[in-house]
Image: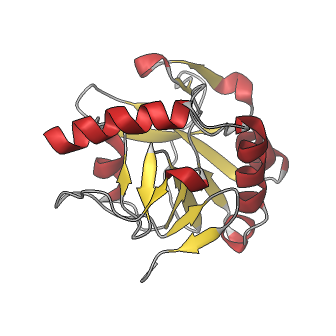
């Protein structure tokens, strides 16, 4: 745990120092939106990005415009549990847990089926084997144990590492999209 905590601090600083962020964000989003994984999926599970993360607003808007079912996570408790709720507009989002934009569950319906879906998983960094360093809350680790669709990681080239320490409960993503490539994880 200590190793991951220290690595997390280093990676936060490294991501904050990324240059040409807007152009790289746009390239990552374009690579994702033009991929067969996105185009063939009926449902997109995404997250609303924070300022330091790759900007996912264009993914959210494109999924809505493309007529996809779009769902974002809602943290149900502080113990690492979340559920996905369908949104039809960015206006369906409100500031929720940890100051992150979440679906307003008073007007959004819970997603019941993950058939033919992809999930875009947030992280500070990814390793080429698909493992990631997240933010330490365990929300995605818990959710992914029940999810059987395609898991997609998005990160900057400079945040794609050779190796990241992984625990027994960590699950790798199937695909990693950066500004310059779509990396299919072995076995993914």
Answer whether residue 1 is visible to the viewer in this image. no
The figure's colour scheme reads: secondary structure
- Above or below residue 59? Residue 57 is above
Q: On the picture, is 24 further left or further right than 2?
A: right
Q: Is residue 23 left or right of residue 144?
A: right
Q: Quadrant of residue 5?
A: top left
- Residue at left 24%, top 58%? 166
Looking at the image, which is closer to me, 87 or 25?
25
Q: Where does residue 123 sit, x and y in percent of width and height?
A: 45, 45
Residue 150 seen in the figure: yes
Find residue 141 and report its horizontal and vertical position in percent.
30, 50
Residue at 80% over, 53% down: 67
Between 67 and 186, the one lying in front of the other is: 186
Dividing the picture into quadrants, the one containing residue 173 is bottom left
Question: 146 or 13, which lies in front?
Answer: 13
Residue at left offset 41%, top offset 20% = 97
Q: Nearer the viewer, residue 174 or 8?
A: 8
Residue that appears at 65% across and 46% down:
70
Q: Which quadrant of the figure contains the N terminus?
A: top left
Q: In the rendered view, would you say 24 is above or below 181?
A: above
User: How many marks do you count on the picture?
Assistant: 0
Horizontal and vertical percent for residue 59? 72, 46
Q: Which quadrant of the view contains residue 78?
A: top left
């Amino acid at each position: 745990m200590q190793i991951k905590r220290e690595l997390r601090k280093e990676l936060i600083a490294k991501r904050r120092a990324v240059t040409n962020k807007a152009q790289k964000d746009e390239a990552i989003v374009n690579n994702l939106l033009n991929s067969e994984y996105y185009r063939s999926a009926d449902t997109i599970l995404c997250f609303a990005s924070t300022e330091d993360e790759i900007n996912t607003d264009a993914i959210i808007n494109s999924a809505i415009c493309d007529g996809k079912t779009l769902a974002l996570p809602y943290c149900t408790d502080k113990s690492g549990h979340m559920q996905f709720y369908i949104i039809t507009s960015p206006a369906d989002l409100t500031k929720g847990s940890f100051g992150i934009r979440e679906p307003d569950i008073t007007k959004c319906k819970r997603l019941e089926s993950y058939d033919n879906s992809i999930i875009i998983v947030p992280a500070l960094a990814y390793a080429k084997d698909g493992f990631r360093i997240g933010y330490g809350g365990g929300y995605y680790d818990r959710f992914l144990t029940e999810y059987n669709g395609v898991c997609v990681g998005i990160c900057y080239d400079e945040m794609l590492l050779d190796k990241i320490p992984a625990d027994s409960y960590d699950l790798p993503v199937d695909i990693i999209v950066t500004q310059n490539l779509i990396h299919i994880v072995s076995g993914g």
